[in-house]
Amino acid sequence: MEPSDMGDSVRERHANAQEWATEVSSFNAWVGGSHVETDDSIETRDPVTNESIVEVPLFDSDTVDDTVAEAWDAYDEEWSNTNPADRSEMLFDWIDVLTDHIEELSLLESLDTGKPIGDARGEVLGAIDTLEYYASLARTQSGKQVPARNDVHTYTRSEPYGVVGQITPWNFPMWAAAWKLGPALAAGNTSVLKPSATTPLTTVRMAELSAGVIPDGVINVVTGTGSVTGGAVTEHEDIRKVSFTGSTGVGKGIMEAAAGHFAPVTLELGGKSPFLVFPDADLDKVVDAVASGIFYSTGEICDAFSRALVHEDIVDEFTERFVEKAESYQLGDPLLEETTMGPLTSKEQFETVTSYIDIGSSEGANLLTGGGTPDADEISGGWYVEPTVYGDVDNEMRIAQEEIFGPVQTIQTFNSYEEAIELANDTRYGLAAGVGTESTDIAHNAAADLEAGLIYVNEYGPILPDAPYGGFKDSGIGRDLGEEALDHYQQTKSVYVNLGDPDL
Ligand code: NAD
């Protein structure tokens, strides 16, 4: 069913979409190729209406234990016997099934997260593209021969860890699951994946859609809360590697838990990313880039360009155009194609973002637009916040230093290249940074001087599966995507073979 056919009012459309979702799947956890229920459950809510969509199981340490055992069985009995070509073919078969369900998955993603349906569709396509990249990459790996001595034939093998634990956040659920599953499976591991309790639907559904094409027990999705279910995964002694995407605070605890059993970690954490606008910038391009960077996904995106650092000669023009752009976003029902900004994904996130708006005002920043909730009756029950812009911001303010994870932009000024870089790097985070300039000298120097894992020049995005993604400093350890992620899911073995003289 098309979302636009689901009813004339927001309430009617969402009531129908929620009913439709319960017919698509039970959304129970997916373990060993079947749905599994538990005694306790948690609900996932529609952020537009705050009504429950479905309840999903709450896995505890016993049910996680059973799941890890299933994943090891699948690894020992089947997945470890496959060749890269076998895994590539099975991943492509799964991709075919997912491709047949693009509209369904997009609708589920929009319903669960509040993302505009067009953005949700883009992320489902991004997830499929990521899986395609790793299905292809699986077959391109080669080993290394080490020519150290003529009498010892020495070479390396890259081998999977076995069972890996993967934990994803609520802000781009299916895409994040593909970032984790693609390289882990291509490298030959089986997975126990825990999606966020807030948005588990598409992750469970994509696992369910692997039935019959990926062997049972290779992909396992355990649902539940972070502390109970996530903790049971990261602390489990038979989980040989942990990959986590989420907040910096939780990431620290994950690293400590994984250290208890020496599991290596990949951590994709929070950010407070600056965009530097130099005096020669083409503002037609750059205003759009900075606005997409903070307002895409209602600002609930780890690499959000939440700090605009603008040269003082052009700050007035930039600010005027940026505020106009912020006010042009159309807040509304995410199920309608014309909506460009949906609600925040949960009540908790709404409370966090609105509390930061109070903090910004009390810190003395100048509220230039937004700061409230839209007054349209149709969406009054949802977790909407207006695109918000603060001027006169000081780098010491909390709104300039802490990750808000909402549609809140701060504008600061600089008057030299050195000051711009110093301000940009004056944060504990280092995920992304943007540069607006027409000068190749400025662009490449800034790309080298900025402490961040991702640099965008005159644009926001794209995120390509081919390029590594991750942060410096408190924004993480290791990389998702690219060949680097495949390496993270493998360990190296050196083999020495004695070569005696041919005895003929
Ligand atoms: P979060 O840290 O609260 O939760 C992330 C995941 O960890 C969820 O599945 C959660 O249930 C689980 N979790 C929570 N506590 C846990 C524990 N003690 N043990 C094990 N698992 C636990 O993050 P969130 O609120 O879901 O997501 C938003 C955060 O994620 C932001 O900080 C954002 O910047 C970050 N993020 C980073 C990237 C990146 O690639 N760097 C991408 C997306 C989101």
Image (cartoon, helix red, strand yellow):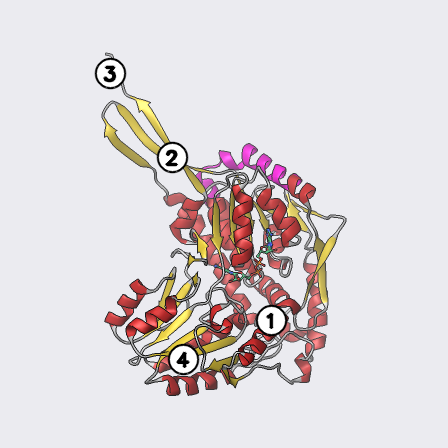
| Residue 252 placement, left or right of 114 | left
Q: Residue 428's spot in the image, x, y percent? A: 44, 62
Counting residues from the start of the chain, the first of labels 1 and 3 encountered is 1
Instruction: Please state which amino acid type lies under the numbered disc 2.
Output: Arg
Give the SS element for disc 3: loop
Tell me which numbered mark, 4 or 1, is placed earlier along the sequence: 4
Q: Locate the N terminus and report the quarter of the image it occupies.
A: bottom right
Discs 3/4, front: 4
Residue drawn at the location 38% of the way across and 62% of the way down: 452
User: Within the magenta stretch, is there residue 214?
Assistant: no
Of discs 1 and 3, which sits in the foreground? 1
Badge 4 marks a residue whose secondary structure is helix
Please provide the residue range marked out in magenta.
Answer: 66-89
First reached walking from the N terminus: tag 2 or tag 3: 2
Residue 71 located within the stretch drawn in magenta: yes
Q: Give the quadrant of the C terminus.
A: top left
- The CA span between labels 1 and 2 is 46 Å
Q: Secondary structure at mark 2?
A: strand
Mark 1 CB in 8 Å range of ligand 1?
no
